Image: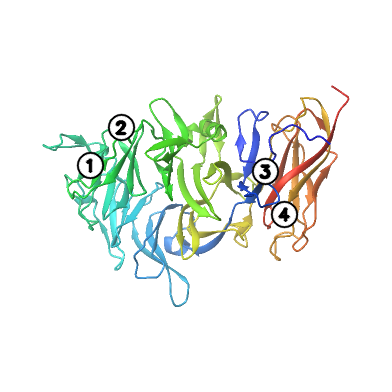
Amino acid sequence: MQQPQMAPWIGPNYKLQGNSMASREAINCFLQSGEGKAKYGELLIGTPGTALLSDLETIVETSEASCRGLHLTGSSPYAGGNLYWVYGSKLGYTYKDELTGDLVNVSLYDIGLDTKRVSIADNGFSVVVATGQSMYTVDIFTDVVEDITSSLPFTEPLQVKFLLGRLYAITGDPSIVANDDLGDAIKSNLIWYSELADAKTWDGLSYIPADLSSDPITAIDVRQGDLWAFGTRTYQIFTTTADPDQPLAYTSGSGTYIGVGAPDTVATIGNNIFWLGSNASGRNMIFQGAGNGSSRISDHGVEDALERLADLAGSAYGFSYQDGGNQFYCVTIPSGNFQFEGSTEFSHGETHTYNTLTGQWHRSASREPLTGEIQAWQPLFSAFAWGKIVVGNLLWPALMELRNDTYTDYDPTTPDKRKPLLRRYMGPVMFTNLQTFICHEFTWDILQGQAPLNGLSSDPKAQLEVSYDGGNTFGSLIPASLQQTGHYSGILKWIGLGASRAFSFRVTITEDMQFQAGQPYTRYEVSRLP
């Protein structure tokens, strides 16, 4: 029997404001190639769950505090390094005890309560923390903390990065520095550098002009041994030199009139660098560095979300992680009020995640256990430490681990400190020459029977919602049974789904079970009615 017209049913997240034309949703599941070896050419794979690794509530001295930064050092008196973190006003670190294998948390300093992200780097001897107002150094081996803000030749240290023996910093300081050789310069248009192997010494003339444009430098990052400097309208790339008085040199031809619209979205992984872009002509496209140039990686679905939430997008933040052969870049638009189509609305936040292997997007999300509201993904920042993918938390002072064998999310407000992990997928609109057709059966080939023996549900279900208007409105939830642990041969099927010119099927699963899915099968007939 002929199948309805549509794009392949499983795919990436791709939703436009006009749902009737594009209404795909892929929440907490992503498209992965079958590499010519699997049952299907492409599969939907579930994103990892989160498990508590270390509770920092006692040491941070509050039950609610967002992670403001994570950084793992290579050098350390402990095997596996020191994982430095900032939660609320507290700067500290966590290490692994070699004898017991336990994680030990150490509180170091109160850097002042704020909600801004901090920037953390190290040179092998000292860790440097820039908060936007102050700069601190921490001796990795003695834990001595020093506030070096007053000795800096600039104020408002925004970010700090390490490259080839030196620390580099940028500032929000708009004042002017005088230089007889180079001419006067605005401090926020400069890249400042420390003395070699010395995190505490920053000379008043130790800077590199980033003067392709007059826009201030708002973000820097290191990619493949080069330093990328971003303004609001441009970026430039600098390479290292052997000249101690000029340790960076502008890479000829690298200047591009694409800047960064949200400085906290700049992130690197492997040989990739990503950012939410802007320039003198527009905003809200996401770019990936390609050689000395850049290429757009956001699609219209992501860009529609950024435009709809434009009032919040300037405060977006990003981070990256690697898992299961995939490298992911996550961009989170935070929660808050925004204006859209003449009215004020509230967003609980959205996280859009890019898979560098497939070039496709999905949404990562957390869910409020009482109200069911879908929120921005609670993990933020990441580090590969002690053989684990360690992430911070958006709401609570805790270090978490991303785990592919965990199908729930950490939540300290629930009795067992975990909550269901919502997975939702809606495929493209199904139609047949825009004629009315009757859908007798919808069957989805989905992995079943793979779940912990102590799963959250003794009667697991998948919930189907059917839209007869292209994904704009939905009918009631229609449950179908999933197989329990150890029963692998069940079929996920719904029958008697009505008639329409355009169907959209949305399936939601919140069970404590592994998630993998292939293509569906639809049995239908064209109606004799117009």
Q: Which residue is mark 1?
A: 208
Mark 3 vs 2, N-terminal side: 2
| Residue for point 47% across, 33% down | 285
Q: Quarter of the image holding residue 300? A: top right
Q: Position of residue 124 (x, y in %)?
A: 30, 61
Q: Which residue is mark 2?
A: 215
SS for tag 4?
A: loop
Q: Quarter of the image holding residue 282? A: top left
Of marks 3 and 1, the one in the foreground: 1
**Separation of residues labelled 4 and 3 (CA atoms):** 15 Å
Q: Position of residue 186 (x, y in %)?
A: 22, 35
Mark 4 vs 3, N-terminal side: 3
Mark 2 vs 1, N-terminal side: 1
| Residue 314 can be seen in this image | no
**Separation of residues labelled 2 and 4 (CA atoms):** 52 Å
Question: Residue 425: which disc?
Answer: 3
**Separation of residues labelled 4 and 1 (CA atoms):** 56 Å
Q: Residue furthest left?
A: 180
Assess disc 3: are there few (<14), some (14-19) or many (≥20) residues with their C-alpha within 10 Å of its C-alpha.
Answer: many
Vertical side of 102 occupied by 107: above or below: above
**Separation of residues labelled 3 and 2 (CA atoms):** 42 Å
Q: Which residue is mark 4?
A: 447
On screen, residue 423 versus residue 193, left or right, reads: right
Q: Position of residue 234 (x, y in %)?
A: 35, 33
